Image (cartoon, rainbow, N blue to C red):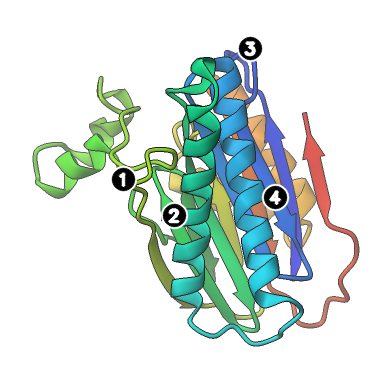
Amino acid sequence: MKVAARTDIGRVRRTNEDALRVDEPLGLLIVADGMGGHAGGEVASTVAVEAIAAYVREQLAGSEAVDHAAALLQAAVRTADEAIWTTASARRDLRDMGTTVVLALCRGNQAHIAHVGDSRAYLLRQGELRQLTEDHSVVARLIKAGQLKPERARSHPLRHQITRYLGNRQAVAEVHCVTWWPGDYLLLCSDGLTNMLEDHQLTEIILQSGADVRAACEALIARANAHGGEDNISVILAYEDHTHTSGPTTVVQV
């Protein structure tokens, strides 16, 4: 697996409230998009990725096998939810903070996906991009109920309202597993990317970069900023290539 990650402040926000974590030996990829103002958002997303990574690392402890992956990821998310709530309870300026999260645990040809909120995971296979997660948001509910057309979602006044997040001690992740094969790409991202770019643009940019996942991450960030960069933008892109010998993971913070 080749993997690269990048986060960018965008063109509008004064701070970056997104956080990333890549643990390539574990096959663990995490994107979190914080909320709750300058300090709160940054703290919540950072606490989330650190708590989840620490929990998964401790539970696996060098094991190649992943038993009960869904339960493992649910427990990791609950641990992060509790950690954020505890941190917020101790400081008045952090009491409204929370975060979304999307993560993947990749072992062999299995990718176990968990998410809370509207950060997303996608699988790109043979030129076809498939969204693996369903947004926990007001707009997604309206679309599912047939009350809103998908093409109007980007401009809807409630487009930023999410229905699930970490930090309220009630977070329940959706978890499922997908099989991925050599030549497949796994994309995890915050909504700062998907609110700026359509699916066909994501596909085009990734395919143009081939197996160069670092170049693809940089190109996705650049295109999102060119389209307005209205939010922080975070991207993790993994490419399954069994012939590849793992090198250092590329993580660029801007």
| Residue at x 38% of width, y 44% of height | 169
Distance of label 2 from label 1 (alpha carbons):
9 Å
Q: Quarter holding the N terminus?
A: bottom right
The amino acid type of the residue labelled 2 equals His
Distance of label 4 from label 1 (alpha carbons):
22 Å
Question: Is tag 4's residue or tag 1's residue first in the polypeptide sequence?
Answer: 4
Mark 2 sits on what residue?
115
Pointer 2 and pointer 1: residues touching (CB < 8 Å)?
A: yes
Mark 1 sits on what residue?
136
| Residue at x 60% of width, y 55% of height | 52
The residue carrying pointer 4 sits among few (fewer than 14), some (14 to 19) or many (20 or more) residues within 10 Å by Cα, namely: many
Pointer 1 and pointer 3: residues touching (CB < 8 Å)?
A: no
The amino acid type of the residue labelled 1 equals His
Q: Quarter holding the C terminus?
A: top right
Rendering coords of residue 95 (x, y %): 45, 23
Question: Is tag 4's residue or tag 2's residue first in the polypeptide sequence?
Answer: 4
Out of 8 and 112, give the one closest to the viewer: 112
Image: 142 above or below 52:
above
Image: 143 above or below 248:
above
Image: 244 above or below 214:
below
Distance of label 1 from label 3 (alpha carbons):
26 Å
Pointer 4 and pointer 1: residues touching (CB < 8 Å)?
A: no
Rendering coords of residue 217 (x, y %): 70, 45
Identify the mark at residue 14; answer none if there is no mark: 3
Pointer 4 and pointer 2: residues touching (CB < 8 Å)?
A: no
The amino acid type of the residue labelled 4 equals Arg
The residue carrying pointer 2 sits among few (fewer than 14), some (14 to 19) or many (20 or more) residues within 10 Å by Cα, namely: many
Question: Is tag 1's residue or tag 3's residue first in the polypeptide sequence?
Answer: 3
